[in-house]
Amino acid sequence: MPFPPAFERYVAPARARPAIWRLALGVAVMLATILLVSAAMAGGLVVALGRERAGALLRQITEPATPTGTLLLLASFVAMAAAPVVAARLLHGRGPGSLIGPGARTVRHFAAAAGLVAALYGLSMLLWSTGFEAERNLAPGLWLQLLPLGLLLVLVQTGAEEAIFRGYLLQQLAARFAHPLAWLVLPALLFGVLHFDPLTMGANAWAVVASATLFGLAAADLVRATGSLGAAWGLHFANNCVAILGVGTKGSITGLALYVTPYTVDEVAVTAPLILADLVTLALVWALLRWRLGRAG
């Protein structure tokens, strides 16, 4: 079955060098890039602050319950953002713009998706508040001071993940295989499995994997329907802004959240139904975006 015209144009840059060995080597290059850039960033902290102070800062990444720990964790995604850019250039001879699609389309779809997600998730949070009472996490003044940097870093974090999973991997697989099991399902499964964290999520770990996989499928289908990374990135950005900067779930990434939930991320009896409710909201967002942006092009 042929790809829609917009999606075919999105995949076209990957068709010049679609060999699987290039993709496999590209994955290795991405992993190496992440390690090297991360090491360089950590080394820069050591040079600037000294080994002891830098080590204390970096340890906060493992428990991002403070503003500093969360900011450092999000900043570490700069390494991930560099990875697909390096792999695409070295292995396929294409630039960073080819990973996201046409600039104007990407921006337009990003804004539309982020706005819709913010509106619907805002309504879902109002419904949530009828059953739960959020707890204050940061003072409003401090939260407002940190908000611009937090938004920028969430943009980087979500953009990095989208560029890898719905950009580089999806494009290179679609350039080689026509069947959606390869280019739509496989990256989504990988995206989901990489969210497996039983130490943090407890018995909810596999439910989170399933939720992340379904999110990846929805995001990939939006890329197919629109021919750019914009809608998927906007969906991801707004979703993470709510979870990281708005109301964080205790035990997860809460250092920049204005509020936190009265329950922890591993309380199955509470969070499992909420994960299901989030998936219903995701399905509604996906259907609306698919209808509106897929039709408008």
Image (cartoon, grey):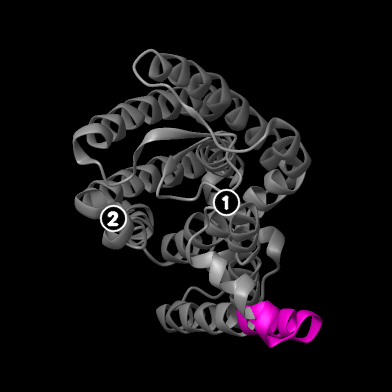
In-front residue for pair 254/31: 254
In this rendering, the answer to whether 262 lies above or below 96 is above
In-front residue for pair 141/79: 141
Q: Earlier in the sequence, mark 1 or mark 2?
A: 1
In-front residue for pair 202/228: 202
- Residue 53 highlighted magenta (yes or no): yes
User: In terms of secondary structure, what is the magenta stretch mainly?
Assistant: helix
Q: Which residue matches tag 1?
A: 158
**Left or right, residue 191 beside residue 138:** left
**Quadrant where the C terminus lies?**
top right
Q: Residue 140: x and y, percent?
A: 70, 31
Q: Residue 248: x and y, percent?
A: 48, 39
In this rendering, the answer to whether 41 lies above or below 131 is below
Count of numbered labels shown in the rendering: 2
> In this view of the protein, can residue 196 be seen by the observer?
no
> Which is in the foreground here, disc 1 or disc 2?
1
- Residue 38 highlighted magenta (yes or no): yes
Crowding at mark 2 (Cα within 10 Å: few <14, some 14-19, many 20+): few
Q: State how far apart marks 1 and 2 are (Cα).
A: 23 Å
Crowding at mark 1 (Cα within 10 Å: few <14, some 14-19, many 20+): many
Tell me the element at label 2: helix
> In this view of the protein, can residue 71 be seen by the observer?
yes
Q: Residue 2: x and y, percent?
A: 41, 47
In this rendering, the answer to whether 118 lies above or below 250 is above
Residue at position x 29%, y 52% in the image = 201
Stretch in magenta: 37-54
* Three-letter residue code for mark 1: Thr
* Three-letter residue code for mark 2: Leu
Tell me the element at label 1: helix
Q: Which residue matches tag 2?
A: 181
In-front residue for pair 162/47: 47
